[in-house]
Image: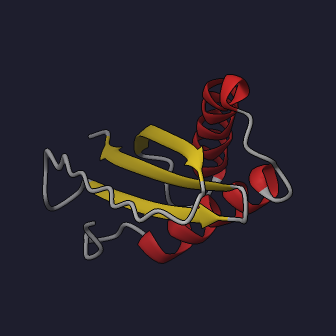
Amino acid sequence: MAEAVRGFPAAGARAAIGEVLKRELEGVQYQGDRMAELGRAVGAQINERLAAEAGLERYKFVTSVTIFQNTGQGAHMGCTAVWDPAADVALQETFTSDSIRCVAAVFAVCVY
């Protein structure tokens, strides 16, 4: 996903996303009937964390969190939606444990 956007601290934002994923998902066992609710909660935590990060005050965030059971299968996810390539960015971070795999895609849209 896009990395080089003028003024957007992609490395810091990606680290913040990774911290939320680890905090919220470490030790969680896959339970199919509660993963949708957990995904919504993790997405809300990511949005709150990014909104509080210094340097991201002018951005709105759209976050998609997908959680699925980790049974050793391979999986790839890709997406992009950049409305203004000079200001907007898409980031992706993955969390994996013995039980689950989670992919969080975040679209950061600059508010002019």
- 87 lies left or right of 58: left
On screen, residue 35 above or below 15: above
Spot occupied by residue 61 in the image (x, y as percentages of width and height): 43, 40
Query: What residue is drawn where x is 44% and y is 39%?
Result: 64
Query: What residue is drawn where x is 60% and y is 57%?
Result: 70
- 9 lies left or right of 35: left
Spot occupied by residue 56 in the image (x, y as percentages of width and height): 49, 54
Query: What residue is drawn where x is 78% and y is 49%?
Result: 24
- 83 lies left or right of 92: left
Query: What residue is drawn where x is 59% and y is 58%?
Result: 71
Residue 5: name its quadrant: bottom left
Task: Point out the image quarter for the N terminus.
Answer: bottom left
Q: Which of 5 and 102 is in front in this view?
A: 102
List the single residue furthest toward the right.
27
Spot occupied by residue 33 in the image (x, y as percentages of width and height): 69, 23
Q: Coloured how? A: secondary structure
Q: Which of 9 and 42 is in front in this view?
A: 42
Task: Point out the image quarter for the C terminus.
Answer: top left
- 66 lies left or right of 42: left
Q: How many labels does the image show?
A: 0
Q: Nearer the viewer, residue 111 or 78?
A: 78
Q: Nearer the viewer, residue 61 or 64?
A: 64
